[in-house]
Image (cartoon, rainbow, N blue to C red):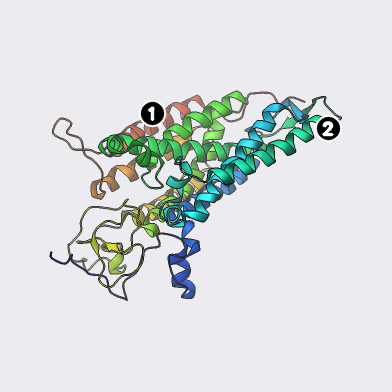
Amino acid sequence: MSKPPTLATESELSMYPDLSYILHDLFGTSPDNAFSLVKTFGLMLGLAIAASGWVLSFELRRKEALGQIRGRIENIIVYKPIDWQEVGLQTFFNFFLAFKFGLLLFHYKEFQRDPAEAIFSLQGHWPFGLMAGVITAVYWIYRLRTQTDQEERRADVLVRPSDRLITITILAGVYGILGSKLFSVLENFGDFLNDPIRTFFSGSGLTIYGGLILAFIMVSRYMMAKGLSLLHMYDAIAPTLMVGYGLGRLGCHFSGDGDWGIVNEAAKPGWFPLPDWVWSFSYPHNVAEDGALIEGCTYNYCHQLVPPVYPTPLYEFVLAMLIFVILWSLRKKIPYAGVLFFVYCFLNGVERFFIEMIRVNPRYDILGFHPSLSQGIAFLLMLTGIAGAWICWNKKITVDSTPEAS
C-alpha cells in the first residue's frame, strides 16, 4: 500500500481544531487534552454572537434617544409560584446534564471528537441521569408543597427596545444555527440520507444564508409581536450582522472546517503583497480531517489539503469588516428608515456572489450557468437591496410613528 502524500513542515502555520491546539501554540502544552472539548469554531461562533449583541446595544440606545424606536408598557409577571411545570422542567434539565456528564466521564474519547454530536445523541449514563433526576424532583416537590405565597403577581412596566437585546440575540443565535444546519442538509442531501442523525447533529456543516433567512423570519416575528418599528430595527441590526459574519468566518478558517475555496496551485503574483498562505493554503491539522496524512503527526487531527486552496474565509472576514465600516459610517447620514438595511442586503449579496466563484460548494445546472445555492440567494439579495433601498428612500420614513405608552 502506497504512503499518502505529505507536505506539512514545522514552519507552516497550523489550524486549531479546538482550544487545546490554541494553547499548544501559545504555551507549548500538549494538544488533544481536556481543553479539546472546546471546539474552535464553536468558540468563535459564541464570540460572534456576543460581539454582534454588543454592537447592537449601542445602536438600540442611540435610536431610542432619537425617538426612532420606542418602548411600550407591558403587563409582566414579577412573581410566579412554583408549579408542576417548573418541577418537570427542572427535573428533566438536571437529568439531562447528569446523563451527558456520565457520558463525558466514561466515554471521554467519543465526547472529545465531536461534543455537539455526543450531546444531541441518545447516548448517556442512565444511572447518573436517574439519580440526578430523582434528587431534583424530590427537592422541587418539597418546595412546591411548602411554599406559602401561591399568588401570581403582575405589574405594568415600560419595556424599551434595548431591554429586549438579550432575547433578540438569543433568538438570532439559536435560529441562525438551526437555519444554517437545515440549509447545509439541503446542499448535502446525500450525506443526510446516508446518516440523518449524525449529519444533522454533528458540530460541522453550517450554511450561513440558511441561518440568516431563518433568524430573520423568527426575529421579525418577535419584533412585530412586541410592536417594534421593523425598518428602524433592521437598520440597527444590519451592521451587527457583518460583525457576526466576519467573526464566524474566522472560526471557519482557524478550525479548518471545510469551508474553504477551490484548489489554487497558481504561483503567487508579484502584485500580491501578502504572505503566501493568504494566497494559497493547505489547512494542516484541519478539523474536517480532509486531505492527506501529515508525515510523523501523532495528534488527533493529522490531515492537510493536497493541493492547497484559496483561504476564502480570510477573504470574507476582510470583506465583512469592510462592509461593517461602510454601514457604520452611513448609519447617521442616511435620513430614511430601512435604506441602511437594504444597502446591507446589496453589499452582502455582492460579496457572497463573487466569493462563491472560488469557493467549494455544490453547483446546479441552470440554463447553461452553474451557480451554487448561495450564489443564487446572493443574486436575489442584490436585487432585493436595490429595490428595497429605492422604495424606502421614496417612503421617507424618519421616526417611529407608534406612540410610546406612558
Query: Height in image: 28 above or below 35?
Result: below
Measured Cα–Cα span from mark 2 to mark 1: 62 Å
Q: Is residue 66 visible?
A: no
How crowded pointer 2 is (Cα within 10 Å; few <14, some 14-19, many 20+) is rated as: few
According to the image, label 1 marks what residue? 387
Specify the quadrant that holds the C terminus.
top right
Q: In this view, does 117 lie to the left or right of 61?
A: left
Name the residue at 48% across, 45% down: 119
How crowded pointer 1 is (Cα within 10 Å; few <14, some 14-19, many 20+) is rated as: few
Q: Is residue 130 visible?
A: yes
* Count of marks placed on residues: 2
User: Type of residue at label 1?
Assistant: Ala
Give the image location of residue 9, x and y in percent. 28, 74
Give the image location of residue 108, x and y in percent. 47, 56
Name the residue at 36% across, 45% down: 205
Q: Given the current orientation, which residue lies at the most extreme front position?
A: 127
**Residue 146 marker:** 2
**Closer to the camera, 187 or 169?**
187
User: Type of residue at label 2?
Assistant: Thr
Secondary structure beneath dot 2 equals helix
